[in-house]
Image (cartoon, rainbow, N blue to C red):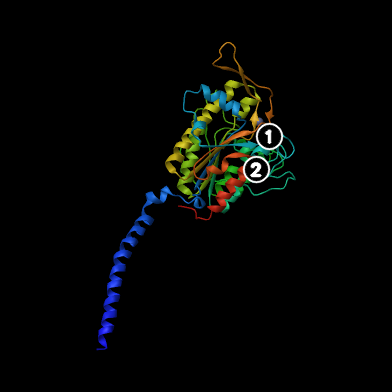
Amino acid sequence: MHNLPIRCIIAAKYVNVNNMRRLIIPCVWLLCLLLLNPFLLRSEPNPRRKKAPKRIIFLIGDGMGLAQISGVMVNDPKQNAFERFPVIGLSKTASADNYVTDSGAGATVFAIGKKAKNGAIGVDSSEQPHRSIFEWAKQSNWGTGLVVTSSITHATPASFYAHVPSRKMEEEIATFLLQQHCDIAIGGGQKFFTERKDQRNLFAELSQLGFTCKQDSVLVQTDAAKLIYTLAPNGLKTMQAGRGDVLLKGTALAQKNLSKHYQKSFLMVEGSQIDWGGHDNDYAYVQAELVDFNEVLNAVLDWAMADKNTLVVVTADHETGGLSLLENKENLGSFKPHFSTKGHTGIMVPVFAYGPGSEAFAGIYENTEIFEKFAQIIKRNGTTQRAR
Ligand SMILES: [Zn+2]
């Protein structure tokens, strides 16, 4: 007698549980499908969890203003790489002591995030050294590299690994590579390593630290994780004098070796001589150098698009020559290039960005911000071990 109500209760519970199972099981399956379906996940990305890039390639067209880009690219039959960038910004270029910066202060601000006096390398306006973006990167186990068509001790590349009050101290600048904040350097400048006033042979000293040091006139492949490669006693040849695709091949070599030996990397590439053509007020020189730089940009964008984990940023330290494109009355579809100075100018320069993190480079900002944006990425994405 006592068992009947108990059996009824049990039966009632059993029925309820079965009903609930019928509801719960399909719900669980639906939830699993929603959570595991990558297409659905991709279709609604969480904006607070943006992917940080594993590789940064920062390309500087020294002296490359909007007039240089507008003028040269309109006549280049090849693909205009600048048009492939989805994010565009403008950078204000004044230095600490001059509205019109030089390349020392112009690159120092990218490297350390502080305005410097013209001519300074890797130090602030009080000549105090600050950790460079290469040093931040190395501390977080990133690989670092630079490829230039000047000497590797010239103002722009020097700013990323050296700290001296004057860009003219190229022998002193070369010694900073012994601190190993730059893993790969490709460009000119071997005389600052092997024909020094102090008689030191820096290639021998760097070799003892594990660097492969090469001095050839032609770039050949090497697998080195730590590489100093000079291709001329000082700056490289001009494109007009037959430099060829050294910047493209050097960039490919640095990118390949950084990718192979380091899980994360920061590579700086400079089209150094766009500036030199501007100083000479030689439009054909500017044109040849910028066409070369454009080839490198296209190649870098191709890698970045395939890799999907590379941030590409392109800008200039300043404009050179005060170039303007004047009306050509003989050919209204063309223009007359006109330089207004043999020096630099203070006009804002464009910034082009592609890849994860690129959205931060939109807008108008001081050139100090470019360092800050890179530093944020390295801070967010920095503590992995070196790959072997
Ligand atoms: Zn210059």
How crowded is the residue under tag 1: few (<14 C-alpha within 10 Å), some, or many (20+)?
many
Real-space CA distance between mark 2 and mark 1, rounded to the nearest whole angstrom:
15 Å
Q: Position of residue 222 (x, y in %)?
A: 46, 41
The residue at 73%/35% (across/down) is 98
Badge 2: residue crowd in 10 Å (few <14, some 14–19, many ≥20): many
Q: Which residue is mark 1?
A: 102
Quadrant that contains the N terminus: bottom left
Q: Mark 2: which amino acid?
A: Thr
Q: Quadrant of residue 338?
A: top right
- Does 250 sit above or below residue 239? below
Q: Is residue 163 left or right of residue 73?
A: right
Q: Position of residue 215 (x, y in %)?
A: 54, 36
**Above or below — where is 27 with respect to 295?**
below
Label 2, ligand 1: CB separation under 8 Å: no
Is 75 on the left-hand or right-hand side of 105?
left
Element marked by disc 1: loop
SS state under label 2: helix
Q: Specify the amino acid type for callout 1.
A: Asp
Q: Does the image show residue 193?
A: no
> Along the polypeptide, which appears first: circle 2 or circle 1?
1
Indicate the position of residue 155 as horizontal and vertical percent values: 65, 37
> Which quadrant of the frame does ligand 1 lie within?
top right
Q: Which residue is mark 2?
A: 368
Residue drawn at (52%, 23%) of the image:
74
Residue drawn at (27%, 83%) of the image: 5
